[in-house]
Image (cartoon, rainbow, N blue to C red):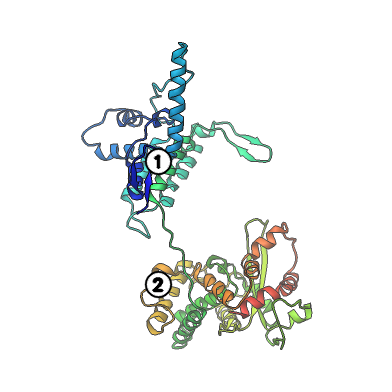
Amino acid sequence: MTEIVDEEGNLWHKSEQRKKRLNEAVAGAHAIIPFQCECCWMRNLEGREITSNDDFYVSLIRRANLDSMAGMSKLTIASHRRTICANVKRCARINKTPLYEPRGPMPLSDTIGMGVMVDMLHKSVTAEGRIRPHVQFDTIRKERSTISKVYASSPKGIGEVSSFAKGAGRVRPTSCPTQSEWLQDALRGCEYRMGFETRADHGVSIEAIVQMLEYIKEDAEEDPTSDDARQLLKIGAFICMVTSASLRGHEGFFADLTGMRLHIDKGRDGVIPVKMSHKKIMTEAECNNLPHVAICLQGNFKGEGGINYHILNVANKTMSGLQTRWWIEKLLEINKDEGYFTGPAFRDDEGNLAASTDYDAVFRQYLSKVQESTDLIEDDINVDTFFSISRTPRKSANTRALRANLSKQHIDKMNRWKTVENAKGRRPRVNMQQHYSEACLLMPTTWFYAYAL
């Protein structure tokens, strides 16, 4: 343990000092925070005295008070306390009343958000978490934003004045208790006490993705005309597409049949140059002649107005064996058999946009099969916990791209296709052929990235 000497000369272990900070009041804190005891807060919040049935309620109020003190530096509180004490002594010498505002009586209401903090702490104790048995700080703080929205839509909230500050957006004076400084301190203290743990989706090797797609293909071929087989092949095409194009899971559902059908024949018979490099400046003719397949996305993208097209031209087949063109052509074939030629490429049995939860369930199911039958995923890894279709394919692709010695700038450029296009302002309304021509010019980025996988 780390040993620490506090300002009073006491020797503490780090864990002991943290426990003391979280569970003991700080001398002088009442002078710079709007402190009230549990009895006063019960009157403010409920309009009554504490009863024998309020033990848990009272403990939440006490915890909120302690968190607000822990949210401020102990040294800051001590500094203000010394300044106040010194000034009071100087004023006493000349018989002067200090200018400090009286510490009471406080208003008989909750103007600082104690009720908000109590609700959040209550949830932190009683709700069940996804990663841990208890919820984390990021979960409980959402209660505050909900209460703010409810307040803003209330008769009192809509009556508050709105104003604008030049260059800083809207400024809204409000008496909503969720915006108080006390609550900010309490939230900081609560976060310090609870801590946080993230469990972001992990990547797998590209070989595991390739093997998973082989298993999907094998299962679909057992009864190729069945609805289940068609859905399996759609999910396989989705997994291959988001991996080779380095898309987040939700972006894959923007895939558009019209654009992909229009461009599917282009790049089928392309030839890989004998001497090539992602650092080499390629001509437009060389780009067009690469073996590629167009992934077309259509939708309302953040930062742009109206419906827009985005096209990413990626390699027909990657170095590790991802057969992107095969899967895209199979996807178009299935949609054609089902009578769909326009609209979203990924639909459910009823023709509606597919649900990501269904795709995610199949993704994890086949990853588990890869784990059981190969050594590509370690046995002690919980597939349901560490992987999802939302980010795992993209992280897998990025890891492979780094191993292929692609630069971070190259990878960032591939992953931030929306940011790059949005930075140029709102895109003009142009036809899909013009979008495709622009996408060809970007193939030194998109094609080489996908080919390296």
Q: Secondary structure at mark 1?
A: helix
Q: Secondary structure at mark 2?
A: helix
Residue 422 sits above or below residue 17 on the image: below
Residue 116 sits above or below residue 89 on the image: below
In this picture, residue 213 sits left or right of residue 66:
right
- Tell whether label 2 touches label 1 (CB within 8 Å): no
Tell me which amino acid carries mark 1: Ala
Q: Residue at the spot x=48%, y=75% of the render?
A: 204
Quarter of the figure that contains the N terminus: bottom left
* Number of residues whose C-alpha sits closer than 10 Å to that of mark 2, classed few (under 14), some (14–19) or many (20 or more): many
* Number of residues whose C-alpha sits closer than 10 Å to that of mark 1, classed few (under 14), some (14–19) or many (20 or more): many
> On the image, which quarter does residue 371 sit in?
bottom left
In this picture, residue 8 sits left or right of residue 200:
left
Q: Residue at the spot x=38%, y=73% of the render?
A: 381
Query: Quick one: which residue is furthest to the top in this view?
Result: 95
> On the image, which quarter does residue 238 sit in?
bottom right
Whole-percent x, y for residue 222 in the image? 44, 88
Query: Quick one: which residue is furthest to the front in this view?
Result: 9
Residue 172 seen? yes
Residue bearing the label numbered 2:
383
Tell me which amino acid carries mark 2: Val
Whole-percent x, y for residue 296 in the image? 64, 72
Residue 313 seen? no
Residue bearing the label numbered 1:
70
The first of marks 1 and 2 along the sequence is 1
Q: Nearer the viewer, residue 9 or 327?
A: 9
